[in-house]
């Protein structure tokens, strides 16, 4: 999947288009070393295809590369971080 990043000021968005449908994960940067993931939206047509999981994994890898932590405010991202113990190095509760 080709996940794209859009940033404007302190707000950002990861998005991916699959089969003509776009899924997204949005965040706010509260400091240079901390982002708050606040929303994930996956269209019904893409549910069960791993699109949300791909967005979450992409955010985790971006945090590792960028040296920042993630606060998973979004219920989907929060659930994903609880399922993946290997992500805890970049998750702040």
Image: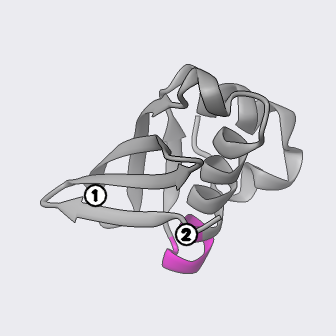
Q: Residue furthest bottom?
A: 65
- Residue named by callout 2: 62
Mark 1 surroundings: few (<14), some (14-19) or many (≥20) residues within 10 A:
few
How was the colour assigned to the protein in this rendering? one colour
Disc sitting over residue 31 in the figure: 1
Q: Nearer the viewer, mark 1 or mark 2?
A: 2
Disc 1 element: strand
In this image, 17 relative to 28: left or right?
A: right
Task: Point out residue 47 in the picture as x, y percentages from the top left corner.
Answer: 70, 27
Mark 2 surroundings: few (<14), some (14-19) or many (≥20) residues within 10 A:
some
Q: Tell me which label, 1 or 2, sits earlier in the chain.
A: 1
Residue 38 colored in magenta in the image: no
| Location of residue 76 with respect to 9 vertically, above or below | above
Q: Residue 89: which quarter of the image?
A: bottom right
**Residue sitting nearer the eye, 74 or 42:** 42
Q: Report the residue at 85% width, 33% height from top.
A: 83
Q: Report the residue at 49% width, 32% height from top.
A: 40
In this image, 24 relative to 83: left or right?
A: left
Instruction: Give the residues drawn in magenta, as a range.
Output: 62-67
In this image, 64 relative to 48: left or right?
A: left
């Amino acid at each position: 999947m080709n996940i794209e990043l859009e940033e404007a000021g302190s707000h950002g968005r990861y998005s991916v288009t699959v089969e003509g449908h776009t899924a997204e994960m949005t965040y706010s940067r509260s400091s240079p070393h901390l982002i708050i993931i606040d929303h994930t939206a996956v269209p019904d047509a893409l549910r069960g295809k791993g699109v949300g999981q791909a967005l979450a994994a992409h955010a985790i890898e971006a945090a590792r590369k960028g040296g920042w932590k993630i606060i998973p405010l979004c219920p989907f991202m929060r659930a994903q971080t609880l399922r993946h113990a290997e992500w805890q190095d970049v998750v702040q509760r």
